[in-house]
């Protein structure tokens, strides 16, 4: 078994990559060459929701692959005739990675043809292949380990569909406390019991998770999923420590739950140490090396374009099949046109080029963080407490409002009236409980704007204290 130190890798570490294996092995129970135990496809039936089990494959889209059979004349799909599409070519300009100036890229004819037409539900084939190879190399996972990749309309699309596929109304679910506000409505509409797992500067507290699970009432089923943002967590900015990730994986095996690894800030890591491996990578290298308990969500929004709406989900094939069946009935497919544009860029850059760009992105946000923290020290050093984030784009700080303090009224009303807008911590708790925490994003503002915003916030806090004789 690899040691802990051997698992901590940097972006450009190319050694010991998993060799691709025959995709036909994905239903195997044991992969002898790698010593891994893979959950069989049949084991996922207990994880799937009633809705997911009731969904049937699309009677049309399920037959798309047969159109590629040599000699077959297809009368199958109601595809519009491409001769009438008014797009002759698509070109766009990107910066050269060597800073030598702009570079003009053209979507090649075959790829443009794919991008303009209906495409497979899980993504156009060359895009899926590029991402599969990338995941193999980035997370050191072989193709014969029961997983695959589906392209999605952003990672939020995949998260919503994954929850719908796994959670029945009223089910208990494990979430971080505080949690990304975007998933709260998903669980609320399913009337879920949201079980909050404590977090701190080192991310999800595996001890808290263990206590919850070991003291779980035998009169009701245990949660099937844990939702977590392990890098630069939204809202706390925390990155979950390696030891805790390994303990979470051990608990997922022991108590049979899936880790929903929402990782949009994975490539926005700018800490002093090498990046901690993902849950997806660690499960193949730790514990009993059984794999199939991690469903991973990635996004291009933070590193290429938020508006292009392309993300991808990686994990056990039966779970991705359920997500794809939802897509086939909801929005047919992620945008093949967007995929063609992104794939043209990825082919031009290659993996090394993408990682070089990611390095630039991380450096940019590290500088933004440093500017914001300097302003925090200047204006709020005596009015707030915080930890320094090592990834993402958020500061999570505690206003010193006393034991009964609540940031909601001050931030939502007084601060806004004072000309500064932020989010009170209460929006990140399902119960809406009182909290003195505030989330602030440092991604967009220039240094002068940051200083002015935090100066205004200081004035608001001091004014509030002056009016009440103490913090309210």
Image (tube, rainbow, N blue to C red):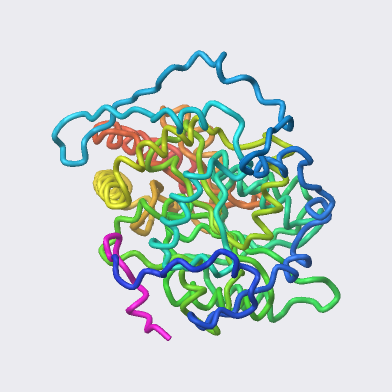
Is residue 200 visible to the viewer in this orientation of the structure? no
The segment highlighted magenta reads 1-13
Q: Position of residue 450 (x, y in %)?
A: 30, 36
Q: Residue at x 56, y 64 (%)?
A: 23
Q: Position of residue 69 (x, y in %)?
A: 64, 44
Q: Residue at x 53, y 78 (%)?
A: 247
Task: Check the image and report above or below for 240 versus 419.
Answer: below
Between residues 278 and 271, which one lies in front from this camera angle? 278
Q: Tell me, yes or no, whether the highlighted magenta stretch contains residue 6.
A: yes
Between residues 451 and 384, which one lies in front from this camera angle? 451
Q: Residue furthest front?
A: 71
Report which quarter residue 327 is drawn in.
Answer: top right
Q: Position of residue 340 (x, y in %)?
A: 45, 34
Q: Tell me, yes or no, whether the highlighted magenta stretch contains residue 199.
A: no
Q: Residue furthest left?
A: 100
Report which quarter residue 12 is drawn in.
Answer: bottom left
In the shown orientation, is residue 461 left or right of residue 449?
A: right
Task: Check the image and report above or below for 165 versus 453.
Answer: below
Q: Residue at x 64, y 60 (%)?
A: 317
Is residue 394 visible to the viewer in this orientation of the structure? yes
Task: Check the image and report above or below for 285 versus 396.
Answer: below
In the shown orientation, is residue 175 left or right of residue 124?
A: right
Q: Position of residue 105 (x, y in %)?
A: 31, 29
Between residues 331 and 260, which one lies in front from this camera angle? 331
Q: Residue at x 51, y 35 (%)?
A: 309
């Amino acid at each position: 078994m690899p040691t802990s130190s051997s698992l901590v890798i940097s972006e450009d570490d190319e050694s010991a990559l998993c060799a691709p294996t025959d995709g036909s092995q994905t239903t195997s129970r044991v992969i002898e060459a790698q010593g891994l135990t893979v959950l069989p496809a049949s084991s996922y039936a207990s994880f799937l929701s009633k809705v997911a089990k009731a969904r049937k494959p699309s009677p049309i889209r399920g037959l798309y692959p047969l159109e590629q059979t040599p000699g077959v004349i297809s009368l199958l799909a109601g595809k519009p005739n491409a001769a009438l599409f008014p797009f002759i070519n698509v070109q766009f300009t990107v910066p050269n990675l060597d800073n030598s100036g702009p570079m003009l890229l053209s979507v090649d004819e075959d790829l443009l043809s794919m991008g303009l037409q209906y495409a497979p539900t899980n993504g156009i084939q060359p895009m899926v292949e590029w991402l599969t190879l990338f995941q193999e190399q980035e997370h050191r996972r072989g193709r014969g380990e029961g997983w695959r990749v589906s392209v999605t309309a952003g990672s939020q699309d995949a998260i919503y569909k994954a929850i719908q596929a796994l959670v029945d109304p009223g089910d208990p679910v494990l979430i971080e406390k505080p949690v990304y506000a975007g998933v709260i409505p998903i669980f609320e509409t399913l009337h879920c019991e949201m079980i909050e797992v404590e977090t701190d500067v080192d991310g999800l507290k595996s001890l808290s998770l263990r206590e919850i699970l070991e003291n779980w009432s035998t009169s009701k089923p245990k949660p099937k999923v844990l939702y977590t943002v392990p890098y630069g967590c939204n809202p706390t900015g925390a990155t979950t420590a390696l030891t805790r990730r390994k303990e979470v994986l051990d608990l997922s095996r022991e108590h049979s739950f899936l880790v929903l690894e929402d990782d949009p800030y994975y490539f926005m890591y700018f800490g002093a140490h090498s990046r901690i491996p993902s849950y997806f990578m660690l499960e193949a290298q730790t514990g009993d090396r059984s794999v199939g308990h991690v469903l991973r969500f990635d996004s291009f929004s933070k590193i290429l374009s938020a508006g292009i709406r392309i993300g991808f989900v990686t994990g056990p094939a039966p779970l991705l099949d359920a997500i794809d069946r939802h897509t086939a009935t909801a929005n047919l497919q992620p945008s093949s046109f967007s995929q063609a544009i992104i794939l043209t860029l990825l082919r031009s850059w290659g993996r090394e080029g993408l990682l070089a760009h990611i390095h630039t992105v991380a450096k940019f946000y590290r500088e933004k963080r440093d500017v914001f923290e300097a302003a925090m020290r200047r204006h709020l050093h005596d009015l707030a407490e915080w930890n320094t984030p090592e990834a993402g784009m958020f500061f999570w700080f505690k206003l010193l409002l006393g034991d009964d303090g609540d940031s909601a009224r001050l931030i939502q009303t007084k601060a806004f009236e004072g000309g500064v807008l932020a989010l009170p911590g209460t929006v990140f708790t399902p119960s809406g409980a009182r909290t003195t925490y505030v989330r602030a994003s440092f991604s967009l503002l220039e240094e002068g704007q940051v200083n002015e915003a935090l100066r205004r916030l200081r004035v608001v806090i001091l004014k509030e204290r002056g009016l009440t004789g103490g913090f309210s």
